[in-house]
């Protein structure tokens, strides 16, 4: 009779399990946070926050810990599961986040802000803070938003098309350096084979999505759903007639945008216009 497997008492939630594993590996080796930081080459406060669930850390530090502990791939795998866990998002957004991770293609129009998949950490932080999120929760939400970009990375990444109103590209961050980084990130993203950016310049007139940000997701079962968002929440729409109506409005805007090459040049011109911060 095969030996019965023992069920551990560790958390089934990816983020908590990741933090638990970090603490276990360190304490089993009798290391203080300061000793670990000295050996691995990172700040002890970062390891403290990772073990307390305040932050997941970046892939570089997780890879370094895997190498130090001799656990190749273990922590990176747990980190990836934690980053992708929809429970880290506010409850009203979780349904969309799950579909976003599963979508085989995505396309978006935004007239007010950049789509979360295109945001830098600084852009996400300023935008979320403007919505009233503070402290540790702000950092967790920034981390969760940036972690979503995994769906656009890798050899089998989902295609993503975004129509960007010029107004989005004129709504700069307070810090010129951070805004330069965001524009440079957009320019870099536009060169990736699975990402296509189009700019809708001023002067093209009114259209059917003036007050609406919408993302369409093509799912593996052939369905297309739409997610309509405002600054106070979002609505997932699956009814075929409503999705098709939004798609017609989207297509009408697409007839007005600059082509991808012209759009990239537009973004690069805006990047050149951002004032450089004075050298010290």
Image (cartoon, rainbow, N blue to C red):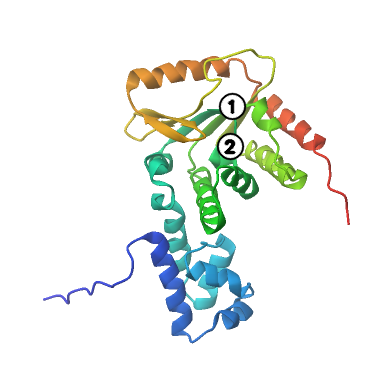
83 on left or right of 183:
left
Quadrant placement of the C terminus? bottom right
x and y, in percent, of residue 69 in the image: 50, 77
x and y, in percent, of residue 244 in the image: 40, 18
- The one of 252 and 211 positioned closer to us in this rendering: 211
Look at 81% across and 34% down and name the residue there: 273
Write down the residue under mark 1.
111
Image position of 50 with respect to 119: above or below: below
x and y, in percent, of residue 25 in the image: 45, 78
Asked which quadrant contains residue 32, the reply is: bottom right
- The one of 209 and 182 positioned closer to us in this rendering: 209
Report, in whole angstroms, how far the alpha carbon at label 1 lies from the one at label 2: 24 Å
Write down the residue under mark 2.
193
Q: Secondary structure at mark 1?
A: loop
Q: Nearer the viewer, mark 1 or mark 2?
A: 1
x and y, in percent, of residue 165 in the image: 63, 25
Sequence-wise, which precedes: disc 1 or disc 2? 1
Q: Secondary structure at mark 2?
A: loop
Quadrant placement of the N terminus? bottom left
Look at 63% across and 12% down and name the residue there: 205
Look at 41% across and 71% down and name the residue there: 20
Q: Which mark is residue 203?
A: none
99 on left or right of 128:
left
Image position of 32 with respect to 13: above or below: below
252 on left or right of 183:
left
Q: Check if mark 1's residue and mark 2's residue have beta carbons within 8 Å.
A: no
**The residue positioned farthest toward the top in the image shown:** 205
Image position of 214 with respect to 205: above or below: below
- The one of 153 and 180 positioned closer to us in this rendering: 180
């Amino acid at each position: 009779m095969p030996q019965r497997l023992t069920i551990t008492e560790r958390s089934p939630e990816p983020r908590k399990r990741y933090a638990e594993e970090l603490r276990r590996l360190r304490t089993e080796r009798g290391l203080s946070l300061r000793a670990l930081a000295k050996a691995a080459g990172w700040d002890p406060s970062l390891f403290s926050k990772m073990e307390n669930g305040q932050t997941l850390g970046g892939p570089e530090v997780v890879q370094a810990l895997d190498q130090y502990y001799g656990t190749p791939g273990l922590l990176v795998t747990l980190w990836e599961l934690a980053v992708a866990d929809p429970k880290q998002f506010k409850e009203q957004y979780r349904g969309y986040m799950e579909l976003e991770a599963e979508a085989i293609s995505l396309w978006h129009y935004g007239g007010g802000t950049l789509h979360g998949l295109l945001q830098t950490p600084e852009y996400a932080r300023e935008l979320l803070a403007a919505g009233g999120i503070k402290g540790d929760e702000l950092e967790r939400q920034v981390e969760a938003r940036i972690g979503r970009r995994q769906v656009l990375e890798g050899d089998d990444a989902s295609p993503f098309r975004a129509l960007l109103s010029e107004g989005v590209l004129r709504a700069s961050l307070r810090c010129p350096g951070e805004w330069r980084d965001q524009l440079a990130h957009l320019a870099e993203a536009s060169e990736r084979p699975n990402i296509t950016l189009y700019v809708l310049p001023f002067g093209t007139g009114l259209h059917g999505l003036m007050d609406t940000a919408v993302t369409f997701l093509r799912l593996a079962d052939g369905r297309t759903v739409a997610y309509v968002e405002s600054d106070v929440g979002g609505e997932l729409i699956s009814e075929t007639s409503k999705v098709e109506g939004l798609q017609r409005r989207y297509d009408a805007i697409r007839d007005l945008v600059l082509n991808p090459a012209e759009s990239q040049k537009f973004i690069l011109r805006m990047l050149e216009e951002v004032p450089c911060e004075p050298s010290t």
